Image (cartoon, coloured by chain):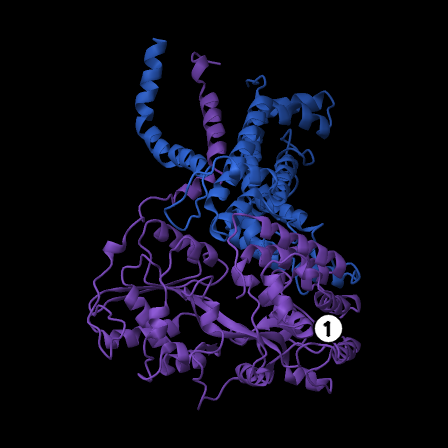
Amino acid sequence: MGSTPEFGRRELIRRAAALGVAAVPAMGLLSACASGGGDDSDNKQVSKGTKSAKNPLAVNEKAALDVVIFDGGFGQQYAKDAEAEYKRAYPSAEVKHSATQDIAPQLQPRFNGGTPPDLIDNSGAKQMDMGTLVGQNQLTDLNALLDAPSVDDPGKKVRDTLRPGVVEMGQFDGDQTWILYYAYTVYGVWYSKTNLAKLDAQYPETWDEMLKVCEAAKKKGIAGWTYAGKYPYYIPFSLYPFIGKIGGVEVLNRIDNLEPNAWKDPAVKAAFEAYYELYRKGYILQGTPGLDHIQSQTAWNEGKALFIPNGSWVENESKKTTPKDFRMAVGAPSSLDKNDKLPFGTLWASGGEPFIVPRHAKNPQGGMELLRIMLGRKSSQNFIKAVSSLTSFNGGTEGLVLPPGLASCQEALDKAGKNVLNPRLQDWYVALEKEKIGVGALGEMMAGRLTPDEAIKKIQKFADDTARDSSVKKYKHK
Amino acid sequence: MQHGKYRFIAGFLLVPLAVYGIFVISPFVQAIYYSFTNWTGLSGDFRVTGLENYQRLWHDEVFWKAVGHNVLLLLLLPLLTLGLGLFFAFMLNVGGRRRKNAAVAGVRGSGVYKIIYFFPQVLSLAIVALLFQFAYNPNSGAINSFLSAIGLDSVKPDWLGDPKLALWCVTAVMVWSNVGFYVVLFSAGMASIPKDFYEAALLDGANRLQTFFRITLPLLWDTVQTGWVYMGIMALDGFAFIQIMTMGPGGPDYSTELLSYYLYTKAFRDGQAGYATTVGVALLIVTMIFAGIVMKLGRRERLEF
C-alpha cells in the first residue's frame, strides 16, 4: 500500500469497527438511568393545605398534581374524568396527566432521580416490581387515605366502602397499605352462552360434564378450550381456583408461601391431570401453543373454541371481535368430584390496576385525594360504564345496564359469596409465576410436552429455587 | 515526524473522543461498577456485594441457556446470511448465461430482483417481527394456511410455540430481513471487480463455481469481513425479535432466551439492575471474544487490483 503503512485508511476503519462491535450491544443502556440523588427529597414536598370536611387529606389547593396512567385494556379516559373532578375541587391546581404502556422504562429513572410522579397506575407487562418498590421503601402508606371519609358519605371511611380483600392485597408484611387496586377483576373460565346453547349445553358444573361438552363440540369440529399460548400464565386464571376448590384455600396459601412440597399436594395433581386430559383427548384448539392473548381471544370469539381462561378485562379487550349475540359469561371452575373442599361457585376475584403513591412524590396528598375521588360512586360508575369492569368500590352497578360479561361477573360474585380466592403468586413473585411456572411448565404441559407429574416436579423446583434466592423478597399469608 | 502525526490526528479526534468517552466509555465503567452491587434500579441506595452477582450468574441455568443461544446465533447467522447474500449477489451479477458483448452477466431480470431483495431492509425490525408473528400463527397464519392448502393438514407445526423450532423460526426471520442488504452490498463490491478477470478465467475454461471461489470471493473478502462484523452485532443483540415474536417472551421453556432479553427482564421486570449489569458484563466479554476472533481470522494478505 501507499506511504502511510501505520495508518492505512482501511486499517483505521477496521479498528473503528472493532470498537464499534464492542460498543453496540445493550450494555450501555442500563447506566443511562444510573443512580444518584434521590436519597432524601422529603424536603422537596409541597406544604400541606388546610384540613377541612371537604379536604380531609389537607391537600395543598395550589400544588400541581402529576399523574401517570397505564394505557392498557382500560385506556386512560376514566383517569382523565377523575382528574377533571379534582380540578373542579381545586381549581388552582394544575394537573399533569400522562399515559403510557412503558411504565418501568419511563418511571424507573424518575424514581432513581428522586422525582417520581404523585400517582401511578403501575400496571401492564412493564410494571415496576412491587416487592422491590416496597422493600426499598419507595411508597407512601395509603392508610391515611383509607381512614379518610369517603367522597359520597362523610360518615363512612374509604376503607369501609371497598370490596372484600382489596385492602389486604395492598399490604405486604406490616399494617401499611402500599397499593390500592382500583379495578376489580373476576378470573375464571370464560365462554359464550350462545355457542354453548348451539350444542344444547349449559356451563358444565362438574368436570365430567365439561369433558362431555368438549366431546360434543369436537364432533362438530369445534375445540373445547383455547388459551393464550404465548403467555401461558393465563392458564392459572382458571387452574388456581380449580386447585383451591379441590383442596381448599390452604393449598393455595402454602403455594404462595413457597412452602416445601406445596405443589406435591394431591389437589394440585388432580387439577393438573384434569387439564392435561383436555390435551390428551384433543380438546385444545389446534395451534393454541403459538397464539398470543389477542389471537386466542379472537379464535374464541369466532366460535372455534368454547372455553378460555381469562380475566374480566377480556370483555373490553375483545370488544371489536366479539359478535353481537355472543352473550359472554364467566364460569367458576367446575367441580372435579364430590370430595372437593369448596362448593361450586368458588371463584378467583381480586384487585387489578395497582395504584401507588411514591414516597418521594412532591404532592402525595394530591395523589391520594385523586384516588379518593376515583373511589367515589360517580367515578366508579363512570369506570364501569366506560370499560365494563368493576372497581374496588363496593357498588356502583345500581341502575346501570351492565354488558353481558360484566353482569355475569356480578352474578358469579354473588354466587361465590365468601368463597372468593386470591392466589398471590402473580403479584408477589412475578418471575416465578410468569416465566417459570407459566411459560416453563404449564405451557409445556398443555402443549403435551410435559406430563402432569413432570410439570409438578419442575414447578416445585422453580418454587424451591425462588425460596432459596436471597435477591427475591419473600412474603407470607397472614 | 512520526510523533507529530499522532498529535495531528489526536487533535482532530479530541471532540469526538470526548463525546465517546462521556457517552460510551463512562457508562461502561459505571455498569461494571454496578455489577458488584445489589442496586435494584428503583432507588438510589444500594450496597456493594462483591462477587455475589457473579457467583449467582455462574449457577444460573437460564443465563447459560442464553449464552448458548447467543453463541449459536453468532455462528449461524453470519454464515447463513452472508452465504445466501453472496450466492444471490453472484447470481445477479455473474451467474447468468453468457450474452453477446458481455463477458459476464446476471440472471435475467436481475435488476428487478435486486430491488425486491432490498425490500425487507426498508421495513423496521418491529414490523418485520410482527408480520412474521402473524405468519407463524399456527391457527390461521400464512405458513400453516399454505400447508393446509397443499394438503399437508397433518403437519402443522406450532412454530414459535414449539421449543424445538422456536429459535430456528427467529433465525429464519433474522436472515430474511438482513440478506437483502448484503445482496446489494456484495453486488456493489462485485461491480468493482474488473470484468477482464472473469473473461480470462472463462477463456481458460473455468466454470461458475471456480470463478466464484477463485475470483469473486477473494476479491470481495474485505466486504465479507465487514458484513461478518455487522451480522455478529445482530446476533448478539436480537432483542427486538425476541421481545416481539417469541412466546413468553423468551420461550417456550427458555428456548429463545438471549442475553440481551435476559438482561432486560432482570433490570426492568424483576428490579435487579445490579444483576442485570452483571449479565451485561458477561455480554461484553462474549462480544470481546467475538471481536478478537474476527480480527484474528480477518488478517490476511490484501489483494490489490
The colour one sees for chain B in the rendered image is blue
Q: Nearer the viewer, residue A471 or A224?
A: A471
- Within-10-Å neighbours for mark 1: few <14, some 14–19, many 20+: many
- Whether residue A298 is visible, yes or no, is no
Residue A251, x across and y down, in percent? 65, 67
A106 versus A337 height, above or below: above
Residue A268 found in image quarter? bottom right
Q: Nearer the viewer, residue A58 or B200?
A: A58
The single residue placed furthest to the bottom in the displayed view is A399
> Viewed as shown, does residue A399 lie left or right of A276?
left
> Viewed as shown, does residue B229 lie left or right of A12?
right
* Number of marks: 1
Q: Nearer the viewer, residue A355 or A255?
A: A255
Residue A89, x across and y down, in percent? 24, 76
Residue B118 found in image quarter? top right
In the rendered structure, the residue with mark 1 lies on which chain?
A
Q: Which residue corresponds to mark 1?
A: A223
- Residue at left offset 48%, top offset 68%: A169
Residue A393, x across and y down, in percent? 43, 79
A309 versus A405 height, above or below: above
Name the residue type under label 1: Ala
- Residue at left offset 26%, top offset 75%: A56
Q: Nearer the viewer, residue B128 or A118?
A: A118
> Viewed as shown, does residue A60 lie left or right of B220?
left
The colour one sees for chain A in the rendered image is purple
Residue A359, x across and y down, in percent? 34, 58
Of helix, strand and loop, which one carries label 1?
A: strand
- Whether residue B40 is visible, yes or no, is yes
A5 versus A425 height, above or below: above
The single residue placed furthest to the top in the displayed view is B1
